[in-house]
Structures are given as structure tokens and as C-alpha cells.
Image (cartoon, grey):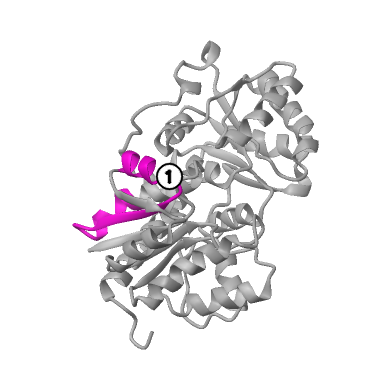
Amino acid sequence: MHVVISGYYGFGNLGDEAVLTALVRRLPEVLPGVEITVLSASPEQTARQLAVAAVARMSPWAVVRAIWHSQGVISGGGSLLQDSTSWLSPWYYLAVMWLAIALRRPLVVIGQGIGPVGNGVTRRAIAWTMDRAAVCNVRDEQSRRELMRWGVRRPISVTQDLALLLSTDGEQSPRKSAGMQQAPRNGRPVLAVNLRPWPGVDERIVDTAAVCDQAVERLGADVIFIPMQDTDVPLGHRLQERMRHGLRVADVPTSPDELLSTLQGARTILAMRLHLLIFALAARRSFVGLCYDPKVEAFAAGLKAAGCSGDAYAALPWEQVNTAGMWKHLVAAWEADNLAPKVRQQMLDLAWQGLLQAAWGLQSGWPKGG
């Protein structure tokens, strides 16, 4: 079977690349012998790194040829169907889905986080498309509710983010990133921190610096800033300048494996970016999430729904991201001795469930009456 994978791939976003890497590695386990072609912004790089076929995502003829020669299309995961970054963004992914529908190829929508979408026409277009997919599963309950509110009539499963599939029990990541090759200074436990560009983050750098200084003084922490993209790096340097004790700013990891290995060297993670929190869970590390976006809140809600009631995994609403709020939750996460292994396994099982649904949808062929 030949499958085309569509998503935000080839742009150097580690979260999305983690989703793609998980798909490429795990799909053959549920679809033996599958051949994969990725629609990528950097097809040569994607092909080299993951040993799959890849074509330019913005080349109409290349995309048409890839889907024409395929037996199915996977859309996902990630936050593809939202218009907060650009009103055009969801229309690209919808166009790829419509091409699959027009060519009567099974369309599988997997592990997606839906919204926010402010445009009513876009919402109706998404609902129409989801009703014609062979399989539709999303990574959180909030996304399912949004689709139902927009008029989707078909069943929608809530699974989990596919990046969780990068780590399974007993597996080790191959190497560490440049920022963590040496042991923590003086053997101190590591607090990994991440901030990303976002409205309001400037005001929170001062609070974050104060919390990091307290972590050094009162918890004996070695603080390291972990950027997920190049745009995060300037925030790391600004945080460094604000701190009395300073911190290390790591290099941007060159692969999801490097990021996972980096987090395995930390004790606790304080972060904005969703996939840094997902990687923390995969690496069995406690975290405090700074909920700048509904998708981070939705991930935290998923943990709670899975039965997580301890201090190891905390999510702080954006309006409560201040020195007192961060410090309170950080201390609790730092000292937590119960990392809820059953919760982590349940989240991992949900991610596998989503992948198995995708395999079923691809093997079932074009939906009857579709």
C-alpha cells in the first residue's frame, strides 16, 4: 500500500516533525509493507532524514501525482485546521483533502487539534470535509466538540497526539543535543525552561526569571533554556539577561530524538510549547505548562480525564502566569514522586488507538456512498 501524508512538515517545527517521525516509524507496524510519500516544504531534507519519498507540498502537479498513485491520504496530526496564524492556512490542508476525495482515495484525519477558526465559511468547509473522511480522530475532547458544533455528523474519536508514539518502554534516544552533552554543572538537577513568541510573553519574562532564580537558590537547580525553533532563542537570551544566576541556552535540537534525549536529562520542565510538554510526558518527567493557547489547556484536560490528580503535571492559565503562580506549581512538580505511570500509559494507548484507526480506514478503501 502507498500512502501520502499531509501536514506542516519540512518547516523545521520540532513538534510537527515529531508527529511525522512517529507516523513514519509506527505506521509500518500496523500496515506492514506500507510505502510513504510526504508532502513537505523541504522534500529533500525530509527524504534524507526519514528515508521516505517526499515531494514539494506547494507544487500542484507533484501533489496530484503523489495522491493519484497512492491508495490513501493521511492528514495530520497537529494544529492544521485553524486560522489564527493565517486565514489561508486551513484552506491548503482542505484542498489536499478535497483532492483525495475527488480522486476517491480513502482520507484519514488523524490526531488533529481543531481550531480556533473564526471564519464561518471555513468552519462549514471543514465540517463538510470531515463527514467525507474514512476516519476522523482528534487529539482532545475540545476539538471533538468544536467539530460537532460546526455540524459534523459522523462519529469522531478522541485519541492523543501522535508524537507520544516516539517513545515506548525500553527505547532509548540515540544521542543528546549540543546543549546537554555535558553533565549538569556541579551535578545539580536540571530545570528545563521554554518560552515562545506570543502576545504577552514579554511581560512574563521578568516573572519567569524570578522563578528560575528561586529554583537555583532554593531547589539547587541548574536552569537550561530549550528552544524548539530558532524564534525561541532570543527569548532564551533575554531570560538569561534578566536572571541573577544566569542560565544556559541550548541549541535548537536537530531532531525529535535529540529533544527527547535532552528532556530525559532534566528533572522538571517549565514550558509554553505544547510538544515540549508532550515530550516531557513521553520522557517521564514532571512539568508545568504555561497555557498560552487552548491546545495546551486541552492537553492538560486530557491528562485530568485520564485520571491524573497529582502534582507532577500542572497547567497554569495564561492570566495566572506570574511569579507566585509559577513558583507554587513548580515546587509541587519538582517534588512530585508519583509521575502517574498509568496515566502516561493510557495516553500512549490512545495514540496507538488513533494509529490503528488510521490503518483500518486506509485498508477499508473509499467509504461507501462517499
Residue 34: % across, % down: 23, 58
Q: In this view of the protein, can residue 276 be seen by the observer?
A: yes
Residue kind at label 1, given as amino acid type: Ser
Looking at the image, the residue that sits furthest to the left is 33
Quadrant of image for the C terminus:
bottom left
Q: Which residue is mark 1?
A: 42
Is 49 part of what is drawn in magenta? yes
Q: Is residue 272 left or right of residue 130?
A: right
Taking depth in this image into account, of 49 and 215 the one nearest to the observer is 49
Looking at the image, the residue that sits furthest to the top is 186
Residue 160: % across, % down: 46, 58
Badge 1, how many Cα within 10 Å: few under 14, some, many 20+? some
Displayed quadrant of residue 84: bottom right
Displayed quadrant of residue 143: bottom right
Asked if 183 appears above or below 101 in the picture, the reply is above
Which stretch appears magenta? 23-50
Q: Is residue 329 left or right of residue 258?
A: right
Q: Residue at x 45, y 66 (%)?
A: 96
Residue 171: % across, % down: 31, 38
